[in-house]
Amino acid sequence: MCFSASASFIAGAVLTVAGIASISQVRKPIHLVFASMPLLFAIQQICEGFVWLSLSNPYFSTWHEPAKYAFLLFAQVIWPFWIPLSFLSIERSPKNRKIIRYFLVAGIAGSIILAYRILFFPVSAQIDGCHISYQIGAFKAILIVTGVLYVAAIVVAPFFSSWKNGIALATANVVSLVTTEVFYEAYLVSVWCFFAASQSVLVFLVMREIRKSPNQDREIEYT
């Protein structure tokens, strides 16, 4: 599978439509945290589109640094806390909410460490074949700790959703991670984010499920 600036921009356009559709299903303001995920992924994919352009066209070279760091801001800093927070915002089971809170704490910790890594270690992005390879310096200990926190917050937390389509989204995320690890390991940051962005169209199905739920008007007790 090849990726390109066009693929990123097209993904961004499709995700924008999915995001608008998801937000149209919102009936409680707190659910906007979850419903807005496709729009955030759209922005991220557009940012990577400009990374592609900056690396392949000298005319866009001045866009390289801001586009690169904007993409990594989403990939490394925003998603580790936003994913568990978004699932927490729609969760109706008190027991599951308590569990997801622990993953949110893990995600926040991961985001802080990854932000430190991006700020204080060398960061590079280059085209390697049909993909972009992002390299971020770090000590081995940081890689291990952030790897565990990242997977816990982004991969494991969604499985504690009590919504059927929420579990489907979590499962698709695992499949995409395994696929990326097997076939695109050297381009994990870029390729997995692309797959995750594509999967976020399932957010619309989750929001529709919530809207159609017979108890959807019942307020969740956020304790």
Image (spheres, rainbow, N blue to C red):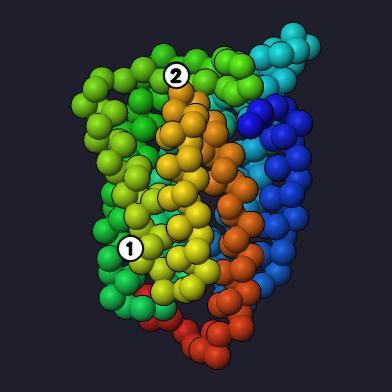
Q: In this view, does 11 lie above or below 62?
A: below
Residue depicted at x 30% and y 55%: 103
Residue at numbered disc 1: 100
Element under disc 1: helix
Mark 2 closeness class: few <14, some 14–19, many ≥20 residues within 10 Å: some
Residue depicted at x 45% and y 54%: 83
Residue 146 falls in which quadrant of the image? top left
Tell whether 109 sits left or right of 185.
Answer: left
- What separation in Å lies between label 1 and label 2 (alpha carbons)? 30 Å
Q: Which amino acid does label 1 sit on?
A: Ile
Which quadrant, please, contains the N terminus?
top right
Q: Relative to the observer, which residue lies in front, 154 or 47?
A: 154
Residue 156 x/y as whole percent: 34, 55
Q: In this view, does 45 lie above or below 66?
A: below
Tell whether 51 sits left or right of 174.
Answer: right
Residue at numbered disc 2: 135
Tell whether 12 sits left or right of 148.
Answer: right
* Mark with earlier residue (1, 2): 1
Q: In this view, does 205 lie above or below 177?
A: below
Which quadrant, please, contains the C terminus?
bottom left
Element under disc 2: strand
